[in-house]
Image (spheres, rainbow, N blue to C red):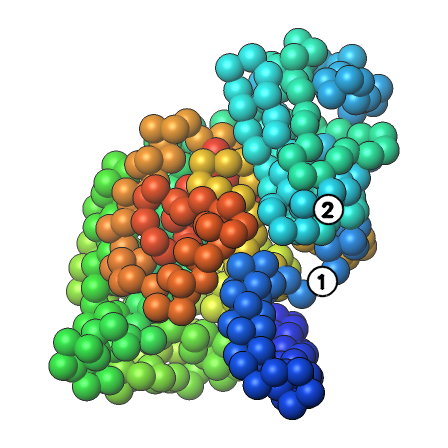
Amino acid sequence: MSRKQQLLKRHRRNKRIGLLVGLLLLVVIGIWVAWWLPFVLGVLAWVAHEAWFADHLFYAPNEDYQYRFSADAEVGAVRLEGGRLLVDSALDADATLVLAIRVKSRWLGRFLDPAIELSGGTSTDRQVFERGVNGVRYLNLSGLAPALVAGELRLRGRFCRLLGAPRLWAWATADYAAQRVMVIAPHADDAELAAFGLYSQADKPWIVTLTAGEIDAEHYQHMGLDPAEASRLKGRLRAWDSIAVPRWAGVPEAHCVQLGYFCLQLPAMRATPDQPVASREANLSDIRLFRQFNPFPLPADVDGLPTWNNLLADLRQLLLTARPEVIVLPHPVIDPHPDHICAQQAVIEALQGLEWQPTTVLGYANHLHDNDRWPMGDAGAGIALPPQFDEGLELTPCSLSLSLEQQRDKAMALGMMHDLQPAPPLKRRVRRWLQRVLAGRAQSPYGENEFFRKAVRRHELFWRLGKDK
């Protein structure tokens, strides 16, 4: 069981215990006070839960985030005076900038999302943190270097205060768009969620999607299809999406590849590398149904078997064909999705002993272990660094800035993805309405799916894996 599954299991257990205690308390109130009062209190308690306590947050808001960065990246003589952040050093305009500071929620910040508002010159941003926050947090100041160097960058707490001395780190960011970039997507839409801004600007981008993403096809069962038919239809649609949507960003069709392996089966494939692992729901053990849009043949086309060895052979051919200088893939520690972990492992294994090696490997996280709402805040806002509590892990962030036009193009790309189009369940829609009315949370203007809020931001955040060669 993954760490995230363990945390979710514990969260649900605690929730059931809390619900049982609440029900017993309501029964006592109904017996000793008034029979109708438990119904009123029950409704109010449910509304309060949906508005303020429904986030999956598997740590205490008063815990300090714990990051370890290289000492040579820290910028000295940084101070916060009268709401202005001041620095004496020169900074590159495209540098990745991270500011550590203690954020303490005000009483209203327990019900409305605390935020740090950043303003300077023509730039404004708002980065949001957990309700009730009281600890060290890491703001992403990338793109704000000119205002910071000019002494014009102001920080203002909204429903929170800034305490203590700030610390600033800066990393030079290479022009990755001028290099050959290959984005590894475990599922259709992962490349767009994590790196649309990067690959849409790249001169020679490649998009390689590992799985068809055919499971959880209830939406298509409502059309009258049986589960296996619905799963195959969903897989075919997502396979098409993985090939067609990158064309919106100008990626050549010849550089879009769908490998067609089965969703959530990569861990089982890795455990038994030479054994085929069939789809969980599509009643399929041949991956070629989902590879029909590929621009050229690959090794696994010969037998269509969903094995780890076939996946490695496919990846090796693609790496030798594309010769990417920059590979973008899921981060092996920060992103806990099992297919994402295996996607990273497959690429690293395929590179072993290969005559071509990338100069840069960037990791991304479309999912987290302990905060399902991250990146917190509204669409269009910056991406503050995620929760991190392993101080032994040295990380090097790399943040790319997206213009409003690029954000809109990214939103349209996500809107073309069939998996993000169905309306959320009724319970989720009601919850979001209550959060808009009672907690002040805005809906994304681009779509109902939560990824329109999470992914369409002024930053795309990556992590350098290893040293650039």
| Label 2: how many Cα within 10 Å (few below 14, some 14–19, many 20+) | few
Position above or below: 253 against 222:
above
- In terms of image quadrants, where is residue 210? bottom left
Q: Is residue 80 left or right of residue 229?
A: right
* Residue matched to label 2: 107
Q: Quadrant of the N terminus?
A: bottom right
Mark 2 and mark 1 in contact (Cβ < 8 Å)? Answer: no
Q: Is residue 465 left or right of residue 100?
A: left
Give the answer, above or below, for where 90 lies relative to 308: above
Q: CA distance from mark 1 to mark 2?
A: 19 Å
Say if residue 250 shows up in the picture: yes
Residue 262 in the image: state x and y as whole percent.
35, 74
Q: Which mark is residue 59?
A: 1
Disc 2 residue type (three-letter): Trp
The x, y position of residue 424, in whole percent, is 34, 64
Residue 153 versus residue 126 in the image, above or below:
above
Q: Secondary structure at mark 1?
A: loop
Q: Nearer the viewer, residue 186 or 124?
A: 124
Q: Quadrant of the C terminus?
A: top right
* Residue 425 image offset from top left, x and y in percent: 35, 68
Q: How busy is the neighbourhood of tag 1: few (under 14 within 10 Å), some, or many (20 plus)?
A: few
Q: Residue at x 81, y 21 (%)?
A: 79
Amino acid at pointer 1:
Tyr
Towards the viewer: 232 or 454 = 454
The local secondary structure at tag 2 comes to: helix
> Is 307 left, or right, of 32 in this rendering?
left
